[in-house]
Image (cartoon, grey):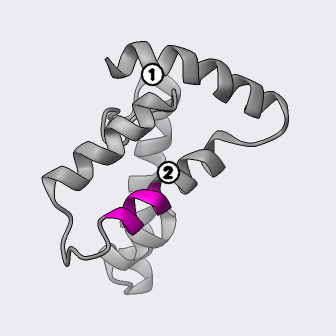
Amino acid sequence: MNQISGLGSGIVKSALVAAGVPESEMNARIKDATELRFAGNMELTYAERRYLANAQQYAGLAVTGTSYHSSIPSGEKGLMEELQKQLFINTVASVGNVDKDILNTFIRQ
């Protein structure tokens, strides 16, 4: 039922985007409304996550938690960048007497 409703609200969403309202702003307002609705809960519940997902789907937005981004590099360029980062981290950590984990975090930001 949400998918059918999402079709109509997707048209409204497209009109709002065309008017200059970014999708991130619409998504932020839906999240704020969900937090207000479940303000009495001390922890995130299944009902709250389900409500948020339904509201996002109804609005024609990407549903939180349904996409996955792999940290594994893909393609030749990504693999070479990863190898260069690891070589740099290992070299600087051994020569400069720097903690490898701290340097790794700094480089990957």
Q: State whether residue 74 is above or below residue 39.
A: above
Which label sits in the foreground, 1 or 2? 2
Relative placement, left or right, of 3 versus 41 is right
Residue 75: mark: 1
Identified at 35% across, 33% down, the residue is 67
Residue at 44%, 29% in the rendered image: 58
Q: Main secondary structure of the magenta part?
A: helix
In the picture provided, is 36 more to the left or to the right than 51? right
Q: Residues within 10 Å of mark 2 (few under 14, many from 20)?
A: some
Q: Amino acid at mark 1?
A: Gly
Looking at numbered disc 2 in the image, what kind of residue is underneath it? Ile
Location of residue 78 in the rendering, given as x and y in whole percent from the top left corner: 48, 33
Residue most extreme to the left: 46
Residue 54 visible: yes
Q: Nearer the viewer, residue 33 or 66?
A: 33
Which quarter of the picture shows residue 104? bottom left
Quarter in which the N terminus is drawn: top left
| Residue 40 percent location from the top left of the image | 25, 76
Any part of residue 87 in sight: no
The residue to which callout 2 is attached is 30
Q: Give residue 86's position: percent from left, percent from top.
A: 38, 54
Which stretch appears magenta? 31-37
Residue 36 within the magenta-colored segment of the rendering: yes
Would you call the spot at circle 1 few (<14 residues within 10 Å), some (14-19), or many (20 or more)?
few
Question: What residue sits 24% from the left and 55% below the top?
Answer: 48
Name the foreground residue: 74 vs 56: 56
Residue 99 or 57: which is nearer the viewer?
57
| Badge number at residue 51 | none
